[in-house]
Amino acid sequence: MLLITCPVTRADELVADRRIRSVTNHPTHVALAVECPSCGSVHVYRTGRRWESREAAPAAAAARPAPELARA
Ligand SMILES: [Zn+2]
């Protein structure tokens, strides 16, 4: 499960994993394309350990950058 805020309706939505369309690793974060239950379109959210550590958040995300990408 994933908690998102829809940029269209500004609603907080709890989204099931099956609504995640794609997961893309980047050097600084993981991009999640999520099908929004609020407005029906696909939004992209950034997550991942390195991204969240900017705000000193715990590493709660399951997806992490691959080791070879983390060095970049
Ligand atoms: Zn939406």
Image (spheres, helix red, strand yellow):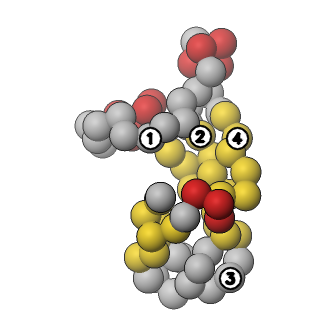
Q: Amino acid at mark 2?
A: Val
Q: Which residue is mark 2?
A: 30
Q: Nearer the viewer, residue 12 or 29?
A: 12
Q: Which residue is mark 3?
A: 40
| Mark 3 / mark 4, whichever is N-terminal | 4
Quadrant location of residue 8?
A: bottom right
Dot in front, 2 or 1: 1
| Mark 4 / mark 2, whichever is N-terminal | 4
| Mark 2 / mark 1, whichever is N-terminal | 2
What's the distance in space between the residues labelled 3 and 2, CA to CA?
22 Å
Q: Are marks 4 and 2 in contact (CB under 8 Å)?
A: yes
Q: Amino acid at mark 1?
A: Ala
Mark linked to residue 24: 4
Q: Position of residue 1 (x, y in %)?
A: 47, 58
Q: Position of residue 57 (x, y in %)?
A: 29, 41
Q: Is residue 60 left or right of residue 67?
A: left
What's the distance in space between the residues labelled 3 and 4, CA to CA?
21 Å
